[in-house]
Image (cartoon, rainbow, N blue to C red):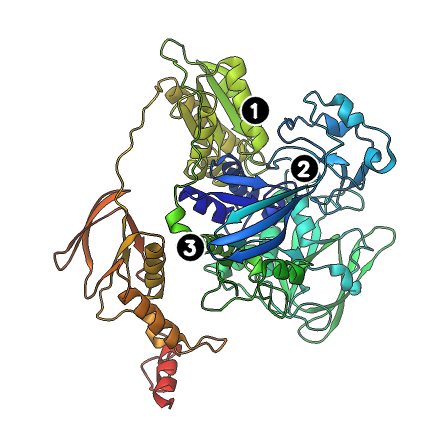
Amino acid sequence: MQASLDLADSGLMVHMINEEPSIGGTMARLDKTFPTGDCAMCMISPRMVESSRHPNIKMYTQTRVVSVEGQEGNFTVKLQETARYVDPERCTGCGDCEPVCPTKVDNVFNLGLDKRKAIYALFPQAVPNTRAIDPERCLYLTKNVCRKCEKVCKALAINFEDTEKIYELKVGSIILTPGLKTYDPGIRQEFGYGRHKNVVTSLQFERLLSASGPCGGEVARPSDGAHPKKLAWIQCVGSRNTHNSNSWCSSVCCMYAAKQAIIAKEHDEEVQATMFYMELRAFGKDFDKYIDKAKNESGAIYRRAMVSGVVEDPETKNLTINYIDEEGKRINEEFDMVILSIGFEPREDSLAFAETFGIEADEYGFAKTSKLNPVETSRRGIYVAGIYQGPKDIPETVIQGSGAAAGAMSVLGDRRGTEIEEVVLPPERDISEEDPKIGVFVCHCGVNIAGTVDVQEVADAAAREEGVAHSETIMYACAPDGQAKVKELINEKGLNRVIIASCTPRTHSPLFQDTIREVGLNKFLFELADIREQCSWVHKDDKEVATQKAIDITNMNVAKARLLDPVSQNSVGVNHTALVVGGGISGMTAAHSLSEQGYHVHLVEREDTLGGLLRRVRRNIEGNDVQAFLAETIERVENNPAVTVHMNSAVEHTDGFIGNFVTRLDNGTRIEHGAIMIATGGQEYEPTEYGYKDSERIITQRELEDLVAEREP
C-alpha cells in the first residue's frame, strides 16, 4: 500500500494486485505494534481506505499474476481473477447473507480459532467491504442445494454464474510485495502445537488480543475460555536452527513477544509472562529499552533456557514446560498457556512466483537482491519490498516500499500525470441558513480507547450538548464500515458538522475530512477530538479520570463546532526544484533518484568531498566492495546535469512554505526550491569510558577499519 500510494500521489496510475479478498496483509491481523503500542488496525485502516478511494489506484482482489512479458518501461502482465460469486459493484457489505448460511468452516483470518461461513468478509474492516463465497465450501456450488444467501440479498449481489476473468495490463514497472508465510510449528512436535489446545502461535495470540478477534479483545484459553494467568513464550520457533527450522533470524520475534507480554499484562494485572530464549536481538533504536520495559514495568521473566518439550495435563489442560537452565539443571514448570514465537518464511510457491516474474530467487526462496541495492531484483524494472526481500519489521517494510516506489518513479517519470483520473465530488451543501446539527461519533478503537475510557458515557454526555443532533459510539471509525456509517447518518439526519472522538489528528483528520466531503459537506466542518493520546494512553491507570477528560475534550470540540463555517481553498504554484542537504550516500542516492524522476536538484555538502562516513567503510559484511560502489555513486552524481553540487557549503537560512522555499547558503548562494530533504548523516561516538585515549591499544571499530585499510596491498 505504501508503494502504491506514493506512486499514485505522484501522478502515476497504479494497478494493485492482491490474491486475498481484501488488502491489508498480515498487519491487519495484529492487535498493536511495538514500540508505541499503536492499534495496528487504526494505523493500517486509513491507508486501506485511502488506497480504495484513490483515483489513481485500480484494485484487483482475488487476483494473481499469470505471466509477465516485455522489458523495463514496457511490460505486459496477464492477470487471473478467481470467481467471487458476489458482485462487488452491487454488494453493500450489509452482512445479511452470513447469518442464513448453514455452512461453518475454520476462519482462516483468525487462524482457526473460530468459525466463519461459506459466504464471508475476510475481516470486519476488509477493503473492499464486499463478501465472497468459498466455492469449496458453498453447498450450492458443491452439492447444488441451498442458495439461502441469494434469497436474503436485497442488493441482488449474489451471482452463482460468476466465472474467472483474465485481464492484460500494460505497465512500465513492477513492484513485488507478496508478503510472508509463517513457519509451521507442527514440525516441532515436542511443543505439541496442533495436539495441545492451549499451545498457540504468536500470530494466533495477536488475534486473541485483538478487539476484532474471536474473543473480542479478552484473552481466553482455547480449551475452556478461561483467562490464563501464567503465560510462556518460546522464542525462535522456526528460526536460527538448521536441524528442522530455518537458519535465518526472522528479526521481529524478540520484540513482538515483549509487546505481547506488555499488552497481556495491560489486559489482566494478574498475568505473569515468562520468556524462554537463547539470545535476545533487540537491535533497533531503543529496542533494548522496550525489553527493559517488559521486564521492569510488566514483570516479564526472561529465562535463557533450552526448551525440550511441552506436556499437557489431560484434566486441567495446563501445560508443563521441560527445560534446561543456564546451570544445566532440568526443570519442569507449569503454565496456563504457551505461545510459540514463530518465524517468517517466503511464500510456499516462492520459486514458481519468481519464475513468473522472471527474477532470481536466493537459496532460501526470497527475492535475490544486491546488498547495496536491496529493492532491485535481477530483472530491470522489477522491484521488491517487504519480507519477500528478507525478514524485517513493519517500519522497515514501509520504508522499503517507498524505496521501491522511488525506483519505479525513476523509470516512469515522463508518464507522470498522463493517466490521472479526476475525482468528481458532489457540490458543497449550502449550510449558511441552517442551525448547527452536529454529529458526534465516539470511537472504541477496539480496546485501545474503550479499554480505558467509557466511550458510551462520552457519547451520552455529548448528546446533551447544544446543537448535537446525533451521538453514538462506533467500533472503528476509520474502517470502511465506520466511514459508511458516518456518511449514511450525515444524509439521514442532515448533519452539517461532524466530530470524531478517536485518535490522533495527525494521521486521521485528512481521512475523515475526505469522508464528509464525499457527501457534500465542506471538509472544514469537521473536528477530531483526540481521546486516545490525551486520555486513554496518559490515564490508562485511572479510568474515571480518563473518561471525564474525554468528555471534556469532546464537549470542547462540540462548542467549537457550533462556530465552524465552510472554508475555501486556493491553489498556488509549486517550485519543482528540490534541495538535498548532505552529500553522503543517502543524500547522493536521493539526489540521483529525484533527478531520474525529472526534477532538478541542488545537493549541498559542507566538506570538500562527497561520500560522508562511507568513505571509511571498505567492505560490508557480505564482502561487497563499498568503495567501488561509492565511487560509482559519486561519479553518477557529479556527471548528472540535473544535479547541481555545492561543495564546502552549509545552509545559513531557509524561509517559505511547502512548495515554495528560499534557502541561502553561507557562501551567499540563493536557491529557490519546493522541497527539502535532510541527509546530514551522523558522527561516530567518541567514548569516554573503557580507557579510550588512555592507551593506543584501545580503539573504535572505525579506527580499526582504517588501520586494516592502511595495511591492505
- Neighbour tally class for label 2: few under 14, some 14-19, many 20 plus, Cα within 10 Å: some
The residue where tag 1 is placed is 485
7 up-or-down from 238: above or below: above
Mark 2: which secondary structure?
loop
Marks 1,2: beta carbons within 8 A: no
**Callout 2, which amino acid?**
Gly
Q: Nearer the viewer, mark 2 or mark 3?
A: 3
**Callout 1, which amino acid?**
Lys
Q: Can you give x and y, in whole percent of width and height, for residue 131 in the image?
A: 68, 33
Image side of residue 122 versus residue 58, left or right = right
- Neighbour tally class for label 1: few under 14, some 14-19, many 20 plus, Cα within 10 Å: some
**Callout 3, which amino acid?**
Val
Marks 2,3: beta carbons within 8 A: no
Q: Nearer the viewer, mark 1 or mark 2?
A: 1
The residue where tag 3 is placed is 411
Mark 3: which secondary structure?
helix
Dividing the picture into quadrants, the one containing residue 29 is: top right
Q: Can you give x and y, in whole percent of width and height, for residue 470 in the image?
A: 52, 17
Q: CA distance from mark 2 to mark 3?
A: 46 Å
Q: CA distance from mark 1 to mark 3?
A: 41 Å
Q: Which badge, 2 or 3, is on the more N-terminal residue?
A: 2
Q: CA distance from mark 1 to mark 2?
A: 21 Å
Q: Nearer the viewer, mark 1 or mark 3?
A: 3
Q: Residue at 27% of width from left, 66% of height from top?
A: 639
The residue where tag 2 is placed is 216
Q: Residue at 28% of width from left, 63% of height from top?
A: 640
* Viewer-nearest residue: 117 or 56: 56
Q: Which badge, 1 or 2, is on the more N-terminal residue?
A: 2
Image side of residue 138 versus residue 9, left or right = right
Q: Residue at 34% of width from left, 86% of height from top?
A: 695
Residue most extreme to the top: 433
Q: Residue at 54% of width from left, 28% of height from top?
A: 483
